[in-house]
Image: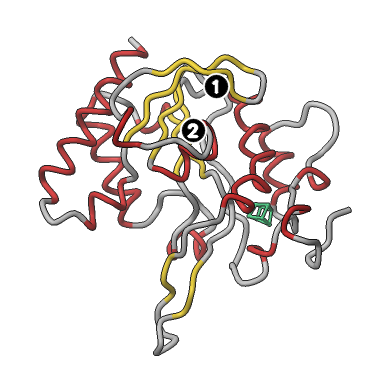
Amino acid sequence: MATTSAPEDAYTATPFLPAGRPSLAALRRAAAGCRGCPLHRNATQTVFGQGSAHARVMLVGEQPGDQEDRQGEPFVGPAGRLLGKALEEAGLDPADAYVTNAVKHFKFTWAETRKRRIHKPPTLREMSACGPWLAAELTVVAPELVVVLGATAGKALLGSSFRVGEVRGTVLEREIHGRPERLVPTVHPSSVLRADDREHAYQGLVADLRVAAQALS
Ligand code: SF4
């Protein structure tokens, strides 16, 4: 079994996955005890994906944020609220979506005052370590479409050369973890919150999600 002192190239969630064909509930329970990379050490808890095993669309983000880490659910913070609004505006029912992240633990540094936790992007090693959970979610949910939210999710699913600006708002067809998938990349909703022209960035997100809605119809 992997240990927390493993070298970086040995990071992997694989030993923590249940054998056989586990349900989402079994995966969630097992992921709660994952020690496949060091990110579990400082985070509050594993934040596994959420939604129906029969969801038609899977939304994949980067990693849990501060609120998600505290509450144990993905996309419950400000970016998640913005995403829910954009989904509805694009004609996608948030209740028909399975939402998850490429990395299941919150990575952060403390602000100097130690009062605020500042998001830190996961490394390629950490993304790759956490990949078996995402692959297992894709196998169980078998979505008709995957919406890729931002660069980290794109790199985790499509490789390190992924550039969101080059492919956002298009339908890609790729084999991912042995399954043919259709994917629509777009920006992460947190980038909309950080944008100078927030309304323009928001409309761009909605436009990309409309491509996803059309691909599902
Ligand atoms: S980030 Fe992923 S691989 Fe690393 S400990 Fe958390 S669940 Fe396991």
Please tell me whether mark 1 sits on a helix, a strand or a loop.
loop
Q: Looking at mark 2, is its residue's CB closer than 8 Å to ligand 1?
A: no
Determine the image quadrant of residue 151: top left
Question: Which residue appears at 30% of the width and 19% of the height?
Answer: 213
Left or right of 8 on screen, residue 102: left
Residue designated by label 1: 54
Number of dots carrying numbers: 2
Left or right of 185 on screen, residue 174: right
Q: Eyeballing the image, is 44 above or below 50?
A: below
Specify few, some or many for label 1: CA neighbours under 10 Å numbering under 14, 14-19, or 20 or more: some
* Dot label at residue 98: 2
Specify few, some or many for label 2: CA neighbours under 10 Å numbering under 14, 14-19, or 20 or more: many
Q: Position of residue 182 (x, y in %)?
A: 46, 17
Q: Nearer the viewer, residue 90 or 188?
A: 188
Q: Position of residue 177 (x, y in %)?
A: 65, 25
Question: Which residue appears at 74% of the width and 49% of the height?
Answer: 12
Mark toward the start of the polypeptide (1 vs 2): 1
Q: Residue furthest top?
A: 217
Q: Amino acid at mark 2?
A: Tyr
Q: Amino acid at mark 1?
A: His
Left or right of 176 on screen, residue 214: left
- Colour mode of the rendering: secondary structure
Quadrant of ligand 1 in image: bottom right
**CA–CA distance in space, label 1 to label 2:** 8 Å
